Amino acid sequence: MIEPFETDDPHDRRWAQGIDGLLGRFNGAGILEAADAHAARRIQDLAAEPDDEVGLAVALAVRGLRHGSVCLDLSSTTAEPLPDAVTWPASGWADRVAASRVAQAGVVRVEDGLLYLDRYWREECQVRDDLVARLALPPPLVDEERLSALAPVLFPEGYDEQRAAALAAARQWTTVLTGGPGTGKTTAVAGLLALLADQSDRPQRIALAAPTGKAAARLQEAVRAALGEVAFAGHAEAVGEPIAQTLHRLLGWRRGSRNRFRHDRRNRLPHDVIVVDETSMVSLTMMARLVEAVRSDCRLVFVGDPDQLASVEAGAVLADLVAGLRARSVSPVSTLQTSHRFGREINRLAEAVRDGDADAAIDLLAAGGEHLELLDAADPAVLAGLRERLVRHAVLLRDAAASGDAAGATDLLDQHRLLCAHRDGPWGVGHWNRVVERALAERTGLPIGDGWGQEWYAGRPLLLTSNDYGLDLFNGDTGVVIASAGGVRAAIAVPRGHRDLATSRLTDVETMHAMTVHKSQGSQTAEVTVLLPPDDSRLLTRELLYTALTRAERKVTVVATPDAVRLAVRRPAQRASGLAARLAG
């Protein structure tokens, strides 16, 4: 869906300076941003392409990448309504682009009406080819008698879904394991590792990986906890304690490159089993780099929830894997259905949102109860109450941190979290972080937060926004600034405790009195407050609301108008991709 941007600022960075013709008109109508128009015009010039309609197609493909689409569906695009100032090219547009100099130069590809920039076409084809090749391999040799004997021990009565999924994964090289939060995906993974360890006469080389450091840490802790269950007594030792890491670290981060790694097709990963958690967050590019680096005799297990938000980069890979591979005659997809984590109300609400049932979602929220609450964002008293709740939590965090109680402060971090769709504006993370810091300064009498110059104050909640391999810290890690005898230090939350670091060693960090829903993926919090923007926000989607709801362990409070909730539930995120069709075919 194309939504023009609107601004009265003549100096807005989205206006393209020096761009005329068709690209200039589409920029002036708010369809293209400056980056889209300039990239397309530069490609036109390099290819000596005279047709502005071809340039427009390239610009729209670049725009689509910014919004997460791998390609541009030219036929459906021309069905979108436009402002009066511009019109779509005439019929035959896709054919003209396919015959253009830009296409002949190999910059773009047109296939089945889909327009790709060459790199993404190649990555999509490569992922298809590598996965289909893995599916065509003879299945791994297993001792069926040992499998049948051990599986009921690891998965007693009540764990039938997990048992079936683990057995299926043991019998094939590639598995896609899906399910919502609390459906026992980690239990199935732990059982699979124990089954495979029992099959081997040597220790298995196991890799646990996730897109972010926070998700990797949670995966490691969850697998360790699952292996500690009574059912695994006597079998967990054979698995050992596999270390979870980010995908970047697994593949071997290469300085100066975002998309190339030490392990690739010529230098494969050495592992026998690779488990990738939170696969919904993996971009097409990262999936291409991963599957090319995996040995053919390594079991590859993708774990995740396809109904969550997709990667912040281009692609909706997990959803494509599920849709495409399920259509094959022999599907490697296993789905866990029954959730055991939430209060019943949260689980039912998440299911209603996932299924697009807006009426059921509103009814559940309106009914409230112990685990659900709906507050109307149009009521000023509601926003004032939200401010007061956040400030109370910030004061408690400040008190613990000022007393030097690092363990208590890091525990408080996971008691409540405000999740926003936007980063900026009155409904965004930046605004609410400033609101809380100002109120905290008023209550404590301390010069903290914006405008005061005291960035590192005791009680400041931290969100790391980049990987630091030297410190073994990762994008998504959280922490708190703690008072100490020598000043303030940072306590960074890690499984089973925290790490103490000088604040000067941290580089890319943000204040985290509030955080975006995207950044919250891979984490869990006791109570979550979801602040939805008005119903004119393009970020208001089913996947965003579902992801936010499923971050909560005990209670969800949704601060939104009923109209905004209805729109979110009824509006699935739309990302153009050809991967599902390629895999199905």
Image (spheres, helix red, strand yellow):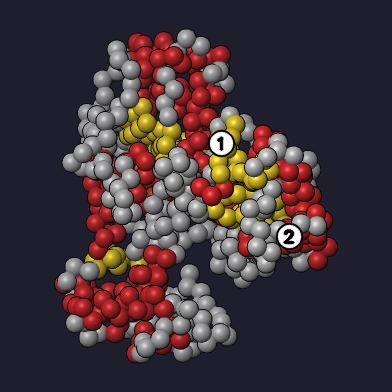
Residue visible at 33% across and 75% down? Answer: 39
Q: Residue furthest front?
A: 486
Front-lying residue, 210 or 261: 261
**Amino acid found under the numbered disc labelled 2:** Pro
What distance separates the C-alpha of mark 2 from that of mark 1? 27 Å
411 horizontally vs 187: left or right: right
Please indicate, yes or no, whether residue 488 appears anywhere in the rendered image: yes
| Rendered view: 159 above or below 443 | above
Front-lying residue, 474 or 143: 474
479 horizontally vs 303: left or right: right
Label 1: element kind: strand
* Residue denoted by label 2: 447
86 horizontally vs 455: left or right: left
Front-lying residue, 485 or 149: 485
Q: Residue furthest left?
A: 104
285 horizontally vs 519: left or right: left
**Amino acid found under the numbered disc labelled 1:** Arg
Label 2: element kind: loop
Q: Position of residue 238 (x, y in %)?
A: 40, 15
Q: Are marks 2 and 1 in contact (CB under 8 Å)?
A: no
* Residue denoted by label 1: 499
